[in-house]
Amino acid sequence: MTCHGETFINKLEHKLGTSLAEKHVKSYRFIPADIVTTRGVQVSIGDSKHYLLKAKESLDKNNLKDSAADCRRAVESISYQLWKKLDKRLKINLKVTMRAPGVPPDLSTVVDSLIKELEKIIGFKELHGNLSELKARYHWSLLIKGVHEDGNDSQPEFEREDISELITLIQSIEENVSSFKLSMARAEEILK
């Protein structure tokens, strides 16, 4: 497939999920002529747009802050996918906090609301538990620390093991959200 829309490819890779994107997506990008110093067509191979794959690549290169930032982006993407699925199948409305008019809801409150709603649905204990673990433990602070600059010089450095555990947890959440399928007929039965 060819496409000049970077955002479209990004969304497509996330719809596939980490495991399918990693196995089946190989990207070839034409480098713009205005940045090429030699004559001819230049192509870049690889460079996945999938946030968890980018997080793994950054971890492999020991770019831990970049990895945490991509983990945060992955949680945003996964949370909105789950929210859409819950709304589409169960007509669930989330209660979220917004900082200002026209600004997207705060990710923390989106995840908190998803946790509350999943608690009411039978059969999603693992997804509920993983999202709860993401919020309740040290992991959430890694997500925040990955995207925000902090003037506090005494803040500890990222640890590879922590980032690796975070990636594994988010990948598990993504797999659960990807396999999240409910029929409309069963939706009423599943709600408590």
Image (spheres, grey):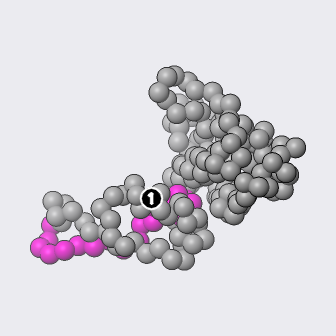
Does 44 appear in magenta? yes
In the depicted view, which residue is nearer to us: 57 or 2? 2
Quadrant location of the N terminus in the rendered image: bottom left
Judged from this view, the residue extending furthest toward the front is 185
In the depicted view, which residue is nearer to us: 86 or 18? 86
Residue in view at x 32 percent, y 65 percent: 3
Is 17 rendered above or below residue 124?
Answer: below
Does 60 appear in magenta? no
Q: Is residue 44 left or right of residue 137?
A: left
Judged from this view, the residue extending furthest toward the top is 100
Count residues near mark 1 (Cα–Cα under 10 Å), then give few for <14, some for 14-19, many for 20+: some
Q: Secondary structure at mark 1?
A: helix
Residue in view at x 55 percent, y 24 percent: 99
Point out the stretch of residues depicted in magenta. Answer: 37-56
Residue in view at x 53 percent, y 37 percent: 148
Residue annotated with mark 1: 10
Mark 1 residue type = Asn
Q: Is residue 168 visible?
A: no
Q: Quadrant of residue 127?
A: bottom right
In the depicted view, which residue is nearer to us: 65 or 123? 123
Q: Where is residue 153? Give x, y as percent.
A: 57, 34
